[in-house]
Image: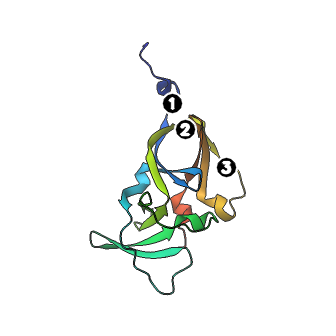
Amino acid sequence: MSDMQEEDYLGASARCVLFTLENEIYGIHVKKIREVLRVGVIRDVAGTPYNVLGVINVRGVIVTVIDTRTMYNMPSKEISELSRIIIVELDDDRAVGMLVDFVMEVKDIPESKIESLSASKDNASRYIQGIAHYQDNVIILIDVDNMFMGHE
C-alpha cells in the first residue's frame, strides 16, 4: 500500500495528447486521435474556408487539414520543423487534420483536475471541453467533435 503514487489518489484520468499553439498548451483525448504526422505536402483546394489549409494524402485517404490557430483567433504561423498535423477521428467517422505548432507528449490528466467550462459556449469557447490545472500547467482540453461540427 505504501508504494501508491500520487496519481493513484487522484482517481480516474483522461489520457491526452498535449500540443501548443502560441504559448498555450492544449490537449485532445487520445481516443480521438488516429495519428500525429510531420507536415508534408498540403495541397491547396480552391474555394475552401479561410481556416482550411488544403488536403493531404494519408495512405490513400484524403484528409482535410485545418489551421488550428485560426480556430482560436490566432494569426497563422510559418510551418516549421516542429509543426505537426494531428489526425483526429470525429464521431461521424470523418478524419480531420489539425495543424499545430508543436506536439509535446501524452499525459494522463486526473479528471479531478479538469474544470468544465460553464461559459455560454459561443465563439471559440464552444470548442473547449474544460481547463485542467495540472503540474504547474494550464491545459485547455479541446472538444474536437464540437470544433468540426458543420465543417465538411
Q: Amino acid at mark 2?
A: Glu
**Please, which residue is most extreme toward the top here?**
2
Q: Are marks 1 and 2 in contact (CB under 8 Å)?
A: yes
Q: Residues within 10 Å of mark 2 (few under 14, many from 20)?
A: some
Residue 1 as seen in the image, left or right of residue 132:
left
Residue 36 bears which disc, if any? none
Q: Earlier in the sequence, mark 1 or mark 2?
A: 1
> Residue 117 shows which numbered tag?
3
Q: Which residue ends up furthest to the right in the rendered image?
A: 120
**Residue at the image point whose x is 57% and y is 64% from the top:** 69
Residue corresponding to mark 1? 11
Q: Position of residue 13 (x, y in %)?
A: 49, 37
Labels 3 and 2 touching (C-beta < 8 A):
no
- For the residues marked 1 and 2, what is the alpha-carbon distance in whole angstroms? 7 Å
Q: Which element type, helix, strand or loop, lies under badge 3?
A: loop
The amino acid pointed to by label 3 is Leu
First of labels 3, 2 by sequence position: 2
**Residue 92 figure quarter:** bottom left
Q: Residue furthest bottom?
A: 46
Q: Earlier in the sequence, mark 3 or mark 1?
A: 1
Q: Is residue 125 above or below residue 52?
A: above
Q: Is residue 8 above or below residue 110?
A: above
Q: Position of residue 128 (x, y in %)?
A: 60, 55
The residues tagged by marks 3 and 2 sit, at their Cα atoms, a distance apart of 14 Å
Q: Judging from the image, what secondary structure is the residue with disc 1 in?
A: loop
Residue type at mark 1 is: Gly
Q: Callout 3: few (<14), some (14-19), or many (20+) C-alpha neighbours within 10 Å?
A: few
Q: Mark 2 highlights which residue?
A: 111
